[in-house]
Image (cartoon, rainbow, N blue to C red):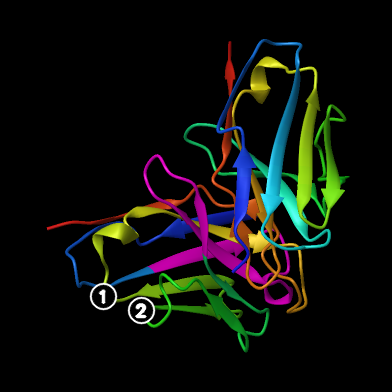
Amino acid sequence: DIPLTQSPATLSLSPGQRATLSCRASQSVTTFFAWYQQKPGQAPRLLIYDASNRAAGIPARFSGTGSGTDFTLTISGLEPEDFAVYYCQHRVQGPTFGQGTKVEIK
Amino acid sequence: EVLLLESGGGLVQPGGSLRLSCTASGFTFSSYVMNWVRQAPGKGLECVSVISSSGDNTHYADSVRGRFTISRDNSRNTLYLQMNDLRAEDTATYYCAKDVSVHWHFVGLADYWGQGTLVTVSS
């Protein structure tokens, strides 16, 4: 198992602000890495795959960077619908999720 | 449109069994790897099990290995999760999720999800 550590646990921001979420793996997962968004009462939604590729239909304000052990999800200008929980995931030696970062309205 | 519909959840006593089903439509089910992912109340996501397109290859989380069995019936476009010896810590919403991959290689990237079925293990 390769655990993932997300930070911060909670991010309090206002609409229009930039959100930066981090995720660190205990060893390299190259770019077999993804980000998901989950809103209350809903299933997760794939945002970013292979570290930096936006999934179909995902707005350009979402971007992913990183490789190896350190990854970042940036939301450049939060919209009201972006306040949610975000999970990182890798798929090396078995798919594993991070514990989540909640982006809440300040 | 890809649709995944889970069923079979409910209340079960510790030590009991339950079989979850996921009926798929809108894509060629037999071509894709499929996943079961669970989420305990108020907690994060855990990939429970993954199965190859043919059913020949499977992966299990350590927490369920030896108790849960994933399978599929490609003629019925249906994914299953047989859960035995259930424990309180198995209480969760169980999601069926389609993998992006058709090959058994770095699996677990889920592009479509069902709405989930709740399993509650309690006496």
Which residues are drawn in magenta?
B20-47
Of residues A95 and A8, which is closer to you in this image?
A: A8
- Hey, which quadrant is residue B59 in on the image? bottom right
Q: Residue at x 43, y 44 (%)?
A: B43
User: Callout 1: 10 Å neighbours few (<14), some, many (20+)?
Assistant: some
Q: Chain of mark 1?
A: B
User: Residue type at mark 2?
Assistant: Arg
Identify the disc placed on residue A57: none
User: Is residue B80 in sight in this rendering?
Assistant: yes
Q: Is residue B21 left or right of residue A38?
A: left
Badges 2 and 1: C-beta atoms under 8 Å apart? yes
Q: Is residue A43 left or right of residue A67?
A: left
Question: Is-magenta flag for residue B40?
Answer: yes
Find residue B122 and report its horizontal and vertical position in percent.
18, 56
Q: Alpha-carbon distance for marks 2 and 1?
A: 6 Å
Residue ID for mark 2: B67
Find numbered disc 2 in the image and state the secondary structure of the residue it sits on: loop
Of residues A77 and B22, which is closer to you in this image?
A: A77
User: Callout 2: 10 Å neighbours few (<14), some, many (20+)?
Assistant: few
Find residue B80 and report its horizontal and vertical position in percent.
47, 73
Find residue B117 and report its horizontal and vertical position in percent.
40, 53
User: Residue type at mark 1?
Assistant: Asp
Locate the C terminus of chain A by quadrant. top right
Identify the disc placed on residue B85: 1
Find numbered disc 1 in the image and state the secondary structure of the residue it sits on: loop
Q: Residue at x 71, y 69 (%)?
A: A92
Q: Earlier in the sequence, mark 2 or mark 1?
A: 2
Q: Chain of mark 2?
A: B
